[in-house]
Image (cartoon, rainbow, N blue to C red):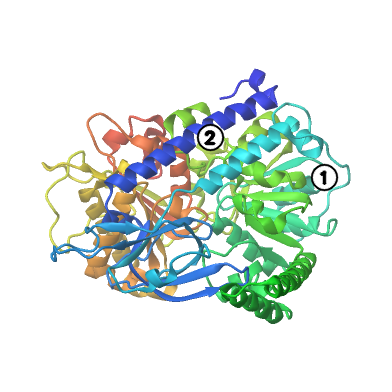
Amino acid sequence: MTSDAETLSPILELQRQRALLQMEYEEERAAYQQMAEAVGVERRVERGDAWMPVSVTRTYYNSLNQLCVEIVRQLGPDDDADHNFEFGRPVQFFRSEKSNTSHLSPLTSHLHYYAFTGTVSFAEAERMVVAVPDGAPLVDLQSGEGQLGVMLSFDETSFRLMFEALERTMRAKGRLGYLRDLFYTRQRAETFTFPDMGFQYLNATQERAVNEVLRAKDVAIVHGPPGTGKTTTLVEAIYETLRREPQVLVCAQSNMAVDWISEKLVDRGLNVLRIGNPVRVDDKMLAFTYERRFEAHPDYPQLWALRKAIRELRAAKKRGEQWHQRMDRLKDRATELEIRIRSELFGEARVIASTLVGSANRLLDGMKFGTLFIDEAAQAMEAACWIPIRRAQRVILAGDHCQLPPTVKCYEALRGGLGRTLMERIAMLKPEVVTLLRMQYRMHEDIMRFSSDWFYHNQMVAAPEVKHRSILDLDLPMTWISSPHVAPPSPPEGGTIDSSASKTIEAPSGAVGGASPSESAGGSYSHFNDFEARLTLLALQAYFELIGRERILQERIDVGIISPYRAQVQLLRQMLKQTEFFKPFRRFITVNTVDGFQGQERDVIVISLVRSNDEGQIGFLRDLRRMNVAITRARMKVIILGDRRTLCRHPFYRKLWQYVESLRG
């Protein structure tokens, strides 16, 4: 926790942030190098950090005049389509070299890495487009020699942009310097004064939040706990701001969060220009990207013809004075057309949307905005927030610092405060700029109450229409099945567990070890618990049997199975595919990590906590914000599986167990 004395020196605090970021950079770089040396391609493919084999389907220049390679991979019926490729991430191509040892798999044979780095333009489940340098060896990539693969590379660009943003902010004068000094001290933020405005479709705290955003001269925070309509509120605040300003900049940490807010703004009737490509590649999402709009401009065919002529002229071997004169004329004409198209697109747009790092895109060079909105600000590092702040007169932050934090891999940097966000800092120094959204519209009151008491000072209220929502009559909204401290032998084929609404289940104990460490990419360790995974699916099967097959299919009751550990997620996915009972329901069941469920909701949430040991070691389950996210994804039912003798040594889990027990009356 930063002391008040430290906050009185913004420059020193930014220097400290830079030092912590340097530690994180070195840790991540070392971890990537270790992974590259120690972890095989097969493991990286399993983790979604690599595709192999892939084939090049075509190469072309996109509307931004980038050379692009389109690749596809073939997925089998049992292959996992999940991957970590998304717009802006750097990648490296490689090829398995032919070996005389014929029995070796391409995934374990010697690999040749190409000496260039590409950037993901967009990626689907089985298809990806990568922008590559003009000199990339396209013929070699398209050859049939060995098998081609692509993997994520270390992201130098994001770190470089964050370092530059911190340096710029430390040197800043004018408005950026003012905001820097304001955000790191207890100096009071300035506001306008006008009567409250009413908004027909908002509740009282949502209305107050929009009014506070409109009144803010410098900064405002919309604190939105789960299910409280943060996005609805933010969209209304942006819409109202645009009645006073010609254009705003909207950013978020992740591409997925940018997609979500952009889609809602488009639905509200606003002209959104998305810098970068969306995670979900469909016509609706692509329609408001800069690249697609650029291609649709009436002058684009003429520009494309000019660019083609330039490339053909470059390929010509004979170069004299006339060659240079013609090249200059073509370049000047192409530049003039490109600037005209860009100016028209930006001139028409009311909202410019990008990730925080994407706001450094050259397309935005020289642009300034009256207001910057940062959504999911509680997931963004401070340094990343300063990248777009330089373009804005005032800053509106929205998010919930009681949910997922920024990802920080260096333990020392985390201890030093790198995981603390700008939103948290401002909320602590200036509580008067924060508006808490209090009424939630997602979950049963009993699911909400524990989260409200522990994280939100008991200020949450369930909307009347969700207060008593449930699937079964007299159902308990929360159930904790305590997996045994040591695992019993496998349950019989087709066995079920009594998970009726009338009691909490205590599974029997036996003689086989419970949780097991499993090595994962980067030399780190994930954990899985084989018995608890089986118990998880048996508990869900028992609950499905209580509901009834026909009702699940007719009402499309959806389920999220969550585990904090990726190894457990992979194990649960495999087991789910192999379990015949769930075959008719698989399209309604999603298995993912806590991070993968951020911003989502399901009728039923099943949580596998994995950890089971004599020492009471619970690892990063100590980050209670992840449990807040996991529990509050549920609308009507939460089923928790975890060894209470291990977990309840921690006061949070002990309190949660006691709360779940109290619901039984």
Confirm whether residue 532 shows in the render. Answer: yes
Residue at which label 2 appears? 21
**On the rendered structure, is 508 left or right of 34?**
left
For the residues labelled 1 and 2, the Cα–Cα distance comes to 34 Å
Q: What residue sits 47% from the left and 64% below the top?
A: 136
| Amino acid type of the residue tagged 1 in the rendering | Arg
Residue at which label 1 appears? 215
Provide residue 184's location: percent of width, then percent of height: 69, 29
**Quadrant of the rendering where the N terminus is positioned:** top right
Badge 1 density bin: few <14, some 14–19, many ≥20, Cα 10 Å: some
- The local secondary structure at tag 1 comes to helix
- The local secondary structure at tag 2 comes to helix
- 323, 245: nearer the viewer: 323
Q: Is residue 244 above or below residue 187?
A: below
Considering only order in the chain, which callout, 2 or 1, is on the residue closer to the N terminus?
2
**On the rendered structure, is 100 left or right of 391?**
left
Provide residue 26's location: percent of width, then percent of height: 45, 35
Provide residue 633's location: percent of width, then percent of height: 47, 53
The single residue placed furthest to the right in the displayed view is 194
- 50, 181: nearer the viewer: 50
Badge 2 density bin: few <14, some 14–19, many ≥20, Cα 10 Å: many
**On the rendered structure, is 513 left or right of 116?**
left
Residue mark closest to the camera, 1 vs 2 = 2
| Amino acid type of the residue tagged 2 in the rendering | Leu
**Quadrant of the rendering where the C terminus is positioned:** top left
Provide residue 657's location: percent of width, then percent of height: 36, 38
**On the rendered structure, is 577 left or right of 563?**
left
Q: Is residue 276 above or below residue 214?
A: below
